[in-house]
Image (tube, helix red, strand yellow):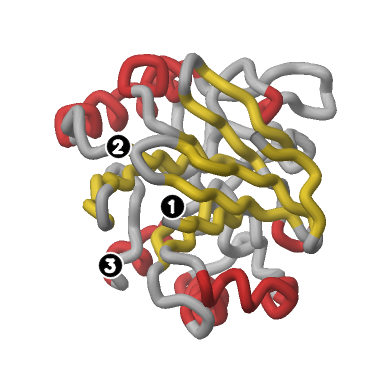
Amino acid sequence: MKVIGLTDIHGRADFLVEISYELKEADLVLVSGDITHFGRREDAYSVVQKIQNLNTRVFAVHGNCDYPEVGFYLEEAGLNLHRNCVPFEEHILAGIGGSLPCPGKTPNEHSEEEFNRYLEQLKKEIHPSPPLIFVSHQPPLDTICDFASSGFHVGSQSIRDFILEVQPLVCFTGHIHEGVGIDFIANTAVVNPGPLHFKGYTVLDIGDKIKDLKLMKGRKIVESL
């Protein structure tokens, strides 16, 4: 199964045209939040429609820069992975949206305690098989993907603990624009391609294990497994 991972679109979806062929050929498109830049339902709809014009098999979580009604729109459209488990072909998709509190307040933030509560509930819905693909706007703690320009790791301990216990094959994440890279928590690949408007995206070939994982910028591979 070929999966395209996008994140931190912030309403700027022009780059989709450049990767339209890859999007059309993909079996699945996953969006790891910040679909809009402090946008509402209609803004999210506009972005999602541009993706769905190229591929209708789309699932997403909201980001911290998306107002709560973006999450409601995703739920109503049948695209929402936030606190949800969705069977897809031979895999299970699950996700968590929003972020930890930011230096400047944003519309969709959760405390570490809230993340822990949400993820404990999510664990009850996840079965040991089939393999899990996890989508989280907030990156887990202590990887390349949560290393901010401040020089600190700013990820979530609760999300890291969830990954260690549940061991998804891959975690698609975002939020930290400079935290671009592929890392591992135990056997789980954690990938942050950076914002779409910086031409970052992920290409994953996956079965019962990861066959290939590429971090792209433009049409060029910048990192791969």
Q: Is residue 109 visible?
A: no
Give x and y (percent) for residue 43.
55, 75
Gap in angstroms between the C-alphas marked 2 and 1 = 19 Å
Gap in angstroms between the C-alphas marked 3 and 1 = 11 Å
Tell me the residue at 52%/72% (across/down): 25
Give x and y (percent) for residue 198.
80, 57
Q: Is residue 95 above or below residue 26?
A: above
Q: Quadrant of residue 117?
A: top left
Q: Tell whether label 1 touches label 3 (CB within 8 Å).
A: no
Instruction: Give the side of residue 121 with respect to residue 134, left or right.
Output: left
Tell me the residue at 52%/22% (across/down): 156
Q: Residues within 10 Å of mark 2 (few under 14, many from 20)?
A: many
Looking at numbered disc 2 in the image, what kind of residue is underneath it? Pro
Q: Tell whether label 1 touches label 2 (CB within 8 Å).
A: no
Mark 1 lies on residue: 61
Considering depth in this image, is 180 or 8 the residue closer to the camera?
A: 180
- Tell me the number on the disc at residue 131: 2
Considering depth in this image, is 71 or 198 the residue closer to the camera?
A: 198
Q: Is residue 13 above or below residue 90?
A: below
